[in-house]
Amino acid sequence: MRVQPPSSCVMEFVDSEIKQALWQGMDLHLEFAAAAVTRQRKDEAPVHGYLTGVTLVLLQCMPAATAALVGRLRSGGLRLQGQALQGRMPVPSLWSQWLCLELEPAQADRLLLQAHGLECRLHAEGAFRESLFC
């Protein structure tokens, strides 16, 4: 089950942490232990923190070795139809077009994932935790 957050959240790949990468048919599911996000509520200042319950589903993803994806991301971004790399995405969101997702795990080389679409899901059990980093 997916729910809309009570505020607007934008995921940043840097410092997000992938819990597992699972193939289901041609779709690749990237489940995050913690997605780095900036939360914006109406009439409030943006707040940086971490959101659980986020899964990226790369639809009809080209085969790739994904074992090294588990853990913290050093960098990452989404490239839509050859456009400039975007390091942020709304949670939840959906793209129904050819795209490339570039992810660089902290302990491995950059990986390029190509797919025919992407769905960023927020599950009901997801929770926001404000970052206390100064």
Image (spheres, grey):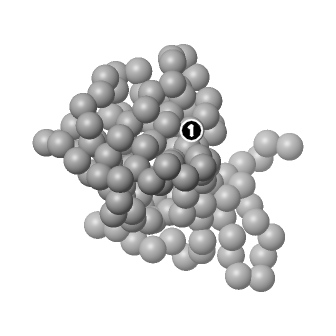
Name the residue carrying label 1: 76
Residue 15, position in %: x, y? 62, 37
Amino acid type at image mark 1: Gly
Going by the picture, which residue comes out furthest to the left? 25
| Residue 94 left/right relative to 17 | left
Is residue 53 visible to us here?
A: no
Position of residue 43 relative to residue 15, above or below, is: below
Residue 45, position in %: x, y? 80, 70
Residue located 45% across and 58% down the image: 126
Residue located 55% across and 52% down the image: 83
Residue 56, position in %: x, y? 38, 50
Residue located 49% across and 37% down the image: 102
Quadrant location of the N terminus in the rendered image: bottom left
Foreground: 101 or 37?
A: 101
Residue located 77% across and 47% down the image: 132
Is residue 49 visible to us here?
A: yes
